[in-house]
Image (spheres, helix red, strand yellow):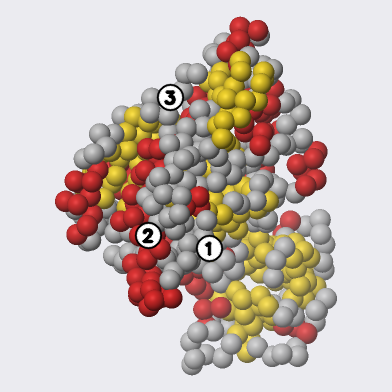
Amino acid sequence: EPDALKHAVQTIQIINKGESVVRGNVTAKPPQHLVNASSIQTRELLNSTSVRKKDGLHKVMNLDVTIKPRDTDAPGQFGWAAEVPLDDLEESKRRWSEGYFNVFLSDRIPVDRAIPDTRPQECMQNLVHDELPTTSVIFCFVDEVWSTLLRSVHSVLNRSPPHLLKEILLVDDCSTKDYLKEKLDAYMAQYPKVRIIRLKERHGLIRARLAGAAEAKGDVLTFLDSHIECNVGWLEPLLDRVHIDRRKVACPVIEVINDKDMSYVMVDNFQRGIFKWPLVFGWSTLSTDYIRKNNIKVSDPLRCPVMAGGLFSIDRKYFYELGAYDPGLDVWGGENMEISFKIWMCGGEIEIIPCSRVGHIFRGENPYAFPKDRQKTVERNLARVAEVWLDEHKEIFYGHGYLHLLDKNLIDIGNLTEQIQLRKKLQCKSFKWYVENVYPELEAPLAKAEGLVFNVGTRKCLVQEKGSLSFGICDLSKQSQHFSYSWVRTLRQNNTCVSAQVAERGVALEACDNTKPHLRWLHKSNKILAEHLIAETHFQHLCLEAGSEGDIVSLKPCDGSSPYQKWHFTHYFAQ
Ligand code: LR7
Ligand code: MN
């Protein structure tokens, strides 16, 4: 389409690290990610009618007022490592816990330092649309270090095209530090685009983000942590993706600001956000094989099963159509899983955009207090997410160290009615769909073991017939012999579970209920132990035993050598 590309045929000056380099005539070519049919990233894109081919395209502005920094000798300038003078070592150690990074150095590094432009070379050729939506940048913070907060804000002001930056909202989540009050007001008064929102009580980062979003006027919400540095050209590629399709949620590559020497460190390419059980976020590099087969370039957007959480751009109206965040999530944690599942399962996409890069200070500890116990807060958040989004897979989550969350006497995860209704209203797809289509690499067998339950002593298999349990000649074709050993450690056939009858030294069958301890069995070293008795010292450990005469299954004191207490499932997915 010659018209659409007219704008792109031009002589372009690429300003690179203080030098002007005339790269000559750049032939008009739409960015590869818009045309490369062999790339799976873009297959949907080509089908999508929302690619506005008629719009003009231009190069990223590479705007960076810090390209020629004022003070080239300042510590940390250009993103280099800064060093603590010997005399100040004590002080720098003492101040570490103010932010759980080198606060002393942060205070000495210019708040508008230059950092290396770490974008892949290809990004220089990428085009973005002329008409991009505006964005509100939202920083939530609680007791953030002064110089770090300022550096975050300046990096946005200095490296974002002014016409795209509607405003910067600083949401103060009830900080206790004095410098974050009048002093911050006075400082930010110099910058008309910056607005401070003060929360009267501690909201936690999730509800603080919601409070910020409610005030935002931009077309797109861009959330950032309050200890980051946006790199050159970071904003346009994010907004471009949202512009192409408002259901795309765009994340920058998150680079590392070293917590000890404050250097800006580039990260490896081709990294996606993933999770492992029990919903633990992590990074995973695409295999070279996959990259080659799909012809993926370093600058291509990567589909991302889950986002890290803190840094992303989302169409403001779309954010609300999705029901924003579950407001029942407290303080910190789990919201990245929640929004990721919601986006994918309800029709959207999450992408990492390699041409957009933002540094973040990774800290070993949270430098703020949790109103309640940290671990309990995070666990509770995760349980909410699991209950609403994971369907039958939630058992895998509970089975990885979180069985205690099923005990309603120990923990109250709060009301989920609205979240469940929302999922229905949005007609979101199942978690099974998500695993198959978005994250097929996830290991997610629905049980730990399944098939026939073979008894070594009798050489027979467990049978469930007419509501009672016995055993008989093993026969794979009989459904009555198919059991599974679930992640929550029930011994189950469909919705019927084997229960321990301690008084009778026997077993019974009852409707499965994951919250009931007497339905749990510990299956290890071929034994099957009644789990709820293990903690009770006045009981001997009781094991499932096949009677040597008659087809009776009973509970007997565990005996390490009895073959009648040895059981195998046909198939084990996990131990
Ligand atoms: O009660 C709070 N109120 C807040 O306003 C707690 C925190 N906050 C602010 C805080 O000041 C900070 O600006 O919220 C922001 C995030 O808190 P961090 O920096 O303590 O979080 P994190 O960087 O350790 O954790 C990651 O996971 C979190 C899970 O809830 C959030 O999603 C963070 O935004 C997220 N950070 C990133 O994604 C950056 C990359 C980290 C990785 C991987
Ligand atoms: Mn952070």
Quick check: 360 above or below 428?
below
CA separation in Å, label 1 and label 3 = 42 Å
Decide: few, some or many residues near mark 2? Use Cα within 10 Å; few <14, some 14-19, many ≥20.
Answer: some
Secondary element at image label 2: helix
Q: Earlier in the sequence, mark 1 or mark 2?
A: 2
In terms of sequence position, does the residue under pointer 1 or pointer 3 come before the other?
Answer: 3
The outermost residue toward the top is 3
Indicate the position of residue 286 as horizontal and vertical percent values: 71, 47
Name the secondary structure under disc 1. helix
Q: How many marks?
A: 3
Q: For this view, does 100 lie left or right of residue 243?
A: left
368 lies above or below 349: below
Tell me, yes or no, whether the two marked residues, 2 and 3, touch with CB atoms within 8 Å: no
Q: In which quarter of the image is residue 85?
A: bottom left
| Residue type highlighted by circle 1 | Tyr
The residue singled out by tag 2 in the image is: 108
Determine the residue positioned at 22% across, 61% down.
176
| Disc number lying in front (1 or 3) | 3
Residue 314 is situated, as x and y percent measured from the top left of the image, at 45, 34
Residue receiving disc 1: 398
Single out the mark in the foreground, 1 or 2.
Answer: 2
Characterize the local packing of mark 3: few (<14), some (14-19) or many (20 or more) Cα atoms within 10 angstroms: some
* Figure quadrant of the N terminus: top right
**Residue drawn at the location 65% of the way across and 25% of the way down:** 23
The quarter of the picture where the C terminus appears is bottom right
Q: How far apart are marks 2 and 3 (CA)?
A: 36 Å
Residue that carries the numbered disc 3 in the rendered image: 133
Q: Which of 526 and 268 is in front in this view?
A: 268
Residue 356 drawn at (x, y percent): 54, 38
